[in-house]
Amino acid sequence: MARRPTADRLLSTEAIGRLRRAAMLSVAAGLFWPLQAMALAWGVQGWVSGADATRSLVAAAFFAGWGLLRAVVERMSARQCYAAADGVIHKLRQGVVTREALRPEGATSSAALAAMLTEKLAALGPWITRYRPAMLRAKVLPLVFIAVAASMSWPVALILLIAGPLIPLFMALVGMAAKEASAKQMVEVGALNSLLIDRIAAMPDILLLNAGAASRAAFEARADGLRARTMSVLRVAFLSSTVLELFSALGVALVAVYVGFSLLGVFHFGTWGAPLTVGEGVFLLLLAPEFFQPLRDLASAWHDRAAAEAVADEVDALTADETPAVLGQGGDAAPLPGPASVHLKGVTVRRGGAVLALPDLEVAAGESVALQGPSGVGKSTTLDLVAGLTRPETGVVEVAGQPLTDESADAWRARIAHVPQSVHVPDMTLRRFLDPHDSGTDMRRALERARAAEIVAALPEGLETRLGETGAGVSGGEARRLLLARAFLTGAEVVLADEPTADLDAATGTAITAALTELAAEGRTVIVATHDTSLAGALGRVVTLEAAP
Amino acid sequence: MIRLWRILRLLWRSEPGAMWRGAALSVVVLLMGVALLGLSGWFITATGLAGLAGIGIAFDVFRPSAGIRFLALGRAAARYGERLLTHDATLRALTRLRVRLLERLETQSFAELRRLRGAVALTRITADVDALDGVVLRLALPVAAALLAHVAAFAALWALTSHAVAMSIALGYVLGGGVVLWRLGRATLGLSSRAERAMQALRQGAIGLFRGRREAILQGTLPRWRAALDETEAEARAAMDRLDAVDTGAGLMLSVIVTLVAAGVFALSGWLVAGREIDPALAAVGVFVALALPETLLPLRRGMAEIGRMRDAADRVLVDVPEAPPEQRAMPSAPARATAALEVRHLSMTRPGWARLLVHDLGFAVAPGETLAIRGASGLGKSTLLDVLAGVLPATAGEVLLQGTPLAAWPAPPLRDTLTLVPQRSALIAGSIRENLALADPALTDADARAALETVALADALDARDGLDTQLGEGGAGLSGGQARRLVLARALLRRPAVLLLDEPTEGLDPGTAARVLAGVRAFLPRAAILTASHRSAELASADRVISLESYIPNVE
């Protein structure tokens, strides 16, 4: 059978070391049980042989002593496991954030990435804390217990030996179905949640259609179908654990019956010389359930492994997305010295599987340029290249007279204002949005020049209004004007705008055109990608991009 | 906590028969497990005594050994039945809970419902419902079963062994274990909501950072955003670590209690045996039962550790449940027969949360069969106006009359039967095209559905797939933007309203299709008063009259 890669690849060396220590502690805790059982067995032997109460007291004291030690060691092991899991999850989280924060064009949605950081990576916890210790316990403890049992009575060892390996055997049969079952069950539960989400998202429409009751009835019917399917799957899953419990119960029962018959003298075989004593019998009976326990623990940890492997696959898929990172670190830097000029020479970019060649472009400092051309020719990509948001596959992007590199990108961006087609309005106050570095400059003038003063006047708390998903909304046209106001405010020497007048009514479009021409008139370098001929006409030069041969 | 209790009652009552049978089987499972070990212990000690006394031949071995086998098999069977019953009942109950949730959401305001559309809010709701499956499976059932098992074990030990042994076991486990578990539950109440809050903050922060990363990179503020996110993560980790420390600490305490109770029972039994007050074999029963009973106690830890999370989820799921059904407004008797289907008088309105008026002193009337277009630049409040006309948002001043009766006086069902609003962002549901259309009319026939689809020029595109049986994904995935828009329109047409309010109805359609769709809508509903809000020429061209909102903007000065 080919070995599938396991989720172990997610574990760091440090975590593996911790888990090894934790697993060894957990095995040690398991080894205390025979000692506890021995204490009790010795005490019971005293009962039948008529020893006085002191012997029981000593036995109880030993039992308690070993038991307390076992409890403490178990807790130490659990805390070590938790620390290992916490470390692994933290590191993976940091890795995802570090990687994805610099990949704005990555294929995974923000909500999916956030889900990965929170509940998905957290799903690794049970696997990390349970699987390896359970595995080591299952490897060591049953063998030790069998050896101990065999030293007193080989038939008991034989009963355990047969009942024990039968568990993995039956598990292999039932477990194969069960593993698939638990995977399916996850899908079903997911489907039920998607169904609920779908209905809640459509709720306003459902109410407008007076269809609340009908929609609920349909939901209930679908949910009930899902439940029926989930149950047919769970039946198989429960069967596997029932088989486990059955064997462990039968093992205990067989040991009890064998020991009882031996003590009665009905059976004369199985011991090494002297007949079985009551104490030995009690000891064997106490040992039997603990022989099965590690195997049962491992079986329940098995399901955690399947969940962890699903997460590991998702982590792999994320790192396999080869969308290149932006140039630089996105940090604060002193503005790059040199003229505010831009020069693209023989640049190609990777778009999906294909390579797109972009026409050369040269923009001198203080020039205003409109980029025109059919959709898909690379107008937006050109702006992203200038801002260092896209990495060229070949060719050179030269800014301020020098090639744009990881080292210079942050400093170059300190001189840029970029107005994208759809503006992301982060969850912060308008003041903070307009003045990200908290310079405290007066904003009135800049807002007026960007024709954005009335937007602020209309907001309930003016500049202190919180924007973004949880706050007051601004429309797309308003957001673009606010970004232009920010360009006035920060004194950016290079203004990049992507279709700033698209999808807007004429009045808003005119306001934006006026603001852009005013920025150009101040001697800033303005590059605008646009289909809008009146906006293009208002700028100094029109460059028509054509698909490069 | 009261809400948690209410959730339990809600879940239990939706499947009481199965729940009680499941609870009974849980007790049977526990008791059989305890009896198996107790009987085995008695059997070994008793046979040992008989062997020593040389009366082995007279000893009845068959009944005890048959009992042991019966308990072993019966326990496994009961366990299987219990799991099936309780899981099935819980799944059924959770479906009921989801339906209750939908029912409750229907009473929320439109603004609140639109806010809920964000993926985060929705994931949160579903996570809450999922968390509640533990209320029955990991909390109520195991606690009830454990208590009953202890009562039964106490009675059996009282009868079979000494009263002191029965008392020590009951006091040690029920009282000692109870205190530890109760303290664990209490400790996690605050901790788990702290952890949950931090985790939600991490999720929000991460979404904010990823959505805004372009902006942050351009502004050079990425490291600052990142530092804030790392801080949130550290807070979440600290809370989780604390939870684990409390949880494993409780585990340690439970192990200590189990060890001490078993040791105490052993010492006590040994003393009684030495004093010949009890038969050694019966004393062994007490010891083995003491060793088997932790099986009732230890599984409760997980449920108790989750209690904080469950309570918070219950609080959110049940929050603001209106205990009484929303007041039913009676339709004013015999509305005056009005000529206008919809009339607006001196209307002023604003956006929710805004101080400034959007529109002031607006007035117009639309007659049946007439089409009125409302134009205005984006952001002027066309969509808000349609919301006000549909009774979704309140007007600040003035009056809206629907068929001569003030809008506010209309009860919801007849209002929705008379007037249909198609908002700019309308949602479809997962399922077939037929299911989507049937939301408008449960008695929908295929012929009606086809007619509506023809009207919006969608029939051909769907015939190329599976027609009315074409399956859509979540939120109507599988249709293009323009197709989804037209399906939403077809759905509204099937309501056959007297007043139809359309917000940007032809967005995403090319001019030819847009004109065809608008003409089709009019032909489908010849007597309806139709209001469109748009800045596109197709709507303006097909209207009988056009009103420009610009004329009603209040003076800022």
Image: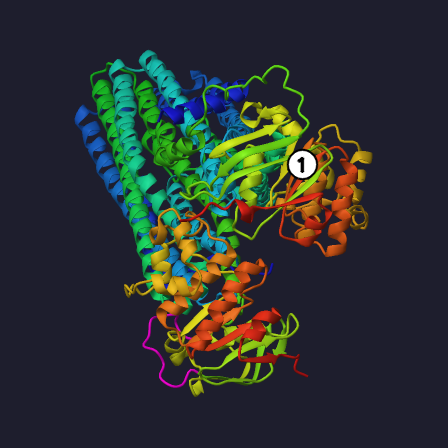
Residue A332 belongs to the span the image colors magenta = yes
Q: Is residue A2 left or right of residue B30?
A: right
Q: How many marks?
A: 1
Q: Quadrant of the N terminus of chain B?
A: top left
Observer-nearest of A62 and B7:
B7
Residue A444 belongs to the span the image colors magenta = no
Q: Chain of mark 1?
A: B
Residue B7 position in % (x across, y down)? 44, 26
Residue A178 vertical placement versus A353 (above, below): above
Query: Secondary structure beneath disc 1?
Result: strand
Residue A109 position in % (x across, y down)? 52, 57
* Residue B65 seen in this snapshot: no
Dividing the picture into quadrants, the one containing residue A87 is bottom left
Observer-nearest of B549 and A527:
B549
Q: Is residue B153 left or right of residue A159?
A: left
Dividing the picture into quadrants, the one containing residue A171 is top right
Observer-nearest of A147 and B437:
B437
Mark 1: few, some, or many residues within 10 Å (few <14, many ≥20)?
many
Identify the residue position indicated by label 1 in the image. Answer: B500
Q: Main secondary structure of the magenta part?
A: loop
Q: Amino acid at mark 1?
A: Leu
* Residue A356 seen in this snapshot: yes
Give the residue at x 64% y 26%: B403
Looking at the picture, the colour scheme in use is: rainbow
Residue A41 position in % (x across, y down)? 30, 32
Residue B24 vertical placement versus A262 (above, below): above
Give the residue at x 52% y 18%: B16
| Residues drawn in magenta | A328-340
Q: Is residue A66 left or right of residue B36?
A: left
Observer-nearest of B31 and B27:
B27
Residue A356 vertical placement versus A455 (above, below): below
Residue A507 position in % (x across, y down)? 54, 59
